[in-house]
Image (cartoon, helix red, strand yellow):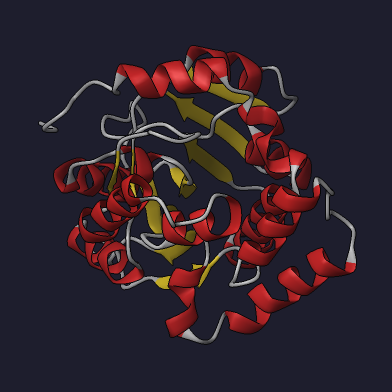
Amino acid sequence: MPSNPAVRPEIIDFYTRSDEAARLRATATGALEYTRTRELLRRHLPPTPARVLDVGGGPGTHARWLAEDGYTVHVVDPVSKHVAQAASIDGVTAELGDARRLTAAAQTYDAVLLLGPLYHLHDRHDRILALTEAARVARPGGLVAAAAISRYSPLLDYIATTGLTETPIQDGVRDTLAQGRYAGQRGFTVAYFQTSAELRAEVTDAGLADPALYGIEGPGWVAVKAIEKYTGANLMGTDMYDAALAAARLAEPHATLTDASAHILAITRPRPV
């Protein structure tokens, strides 16, 4: 059994109050995350028609384009508001559920996405369990894609938006860099931030194949976020946004740059039995 079988109430409250449906379209950094995630998934997804389980799929932001592309998509999410939003999308079904205890039968989906659950599970045992469940319900040879928030993203985010001169801020960043845990003190809820090496180890420990790891936003997201913060401009569609997108693509082959992204994507498959 998972060490913390209930989704933490502060996580449910955060997503119930916030507008997750708009997050990836409101700023250039959000658009960068959305565009790159979709780009990377399309590169690896099986051809349509295929069944996709979107675990922690939120309001269906990615489920929408997946359905439009021709996939049959089912969303599992612990937030009632998200389940209702996802279920309203044509071609998408949704249920209330937990990544650590999926109701799907074994080997029933061609692709399983975990684009949010890992970074809301503080305990390694729970993250392994979520990955193990994804492996269980994926068909042999099927795709499993899991996202993590980079351990170094709070440090880079503070540089871009707040500064690091105050001792309490430095102490909080230092603790997150050392332990990965985030208490939700600034604009987000409780979370766990991973290094790419840690993500790789947990994926393989869950019985999945050694993953390909991608930095989603690339190293340019920090500059984009800083400009948007201090000028108030929205950089979507600008040369700066295009440069950050190009940088993310150029950085892909260079593993040392993976952790410079805000998010990391692991692409893997169940190991042959």
Q: Determine the residue positioned at 74% across, 58% down.
A: 227
Query: Could you tell whether 2 is left or right of 193 in the image?
Result: left
Q: For the N terminus, give its image quadrant.
A: top left
Q: Is residue 139 above or below residue 94?
A: below
Q: Is residue 144 visible?
A: no
Choose top left, top right, bottom left or bottom right for residue 117.
top left
Percent coordinates x, y for residue 209 in the rendering = 31, 69
User: Going by the image, does 10 lie left or right of 228?
Assistant: left
Of 101 and 119, nearer the camera is: 119
Q: Residue 248: x and y, percent?
A: 65, 73
Q: Is residue 192 visible?
A: yes
- Picture coordinates of residue 129 (x, y %)? 21, 43
- Closest to the observer, 87 or 242: 242
Placement of 141 over or under 252, stated as above or below = above
Quadrant of the image containing the C terminus: bottom left
Residue occupying the point 40% across, 52% down: 139
Give the answer, above or below, for where 50 lies relative to 81: below
How many numbered circles are shown?
Answer: 0
Closer-to-camera residue (227/75):
227
Name the residue located 80 percent from the left edge and 64 percent from the top edge. Answer: 241
**Residue 218 appears at what percent x and percent y?**
60, 70
Which residue appears farthest toward the bottom when viewing the image?
254
The residue at the far front in this view is 166
Name the residue at 51% across, 55% down. Answer: 163
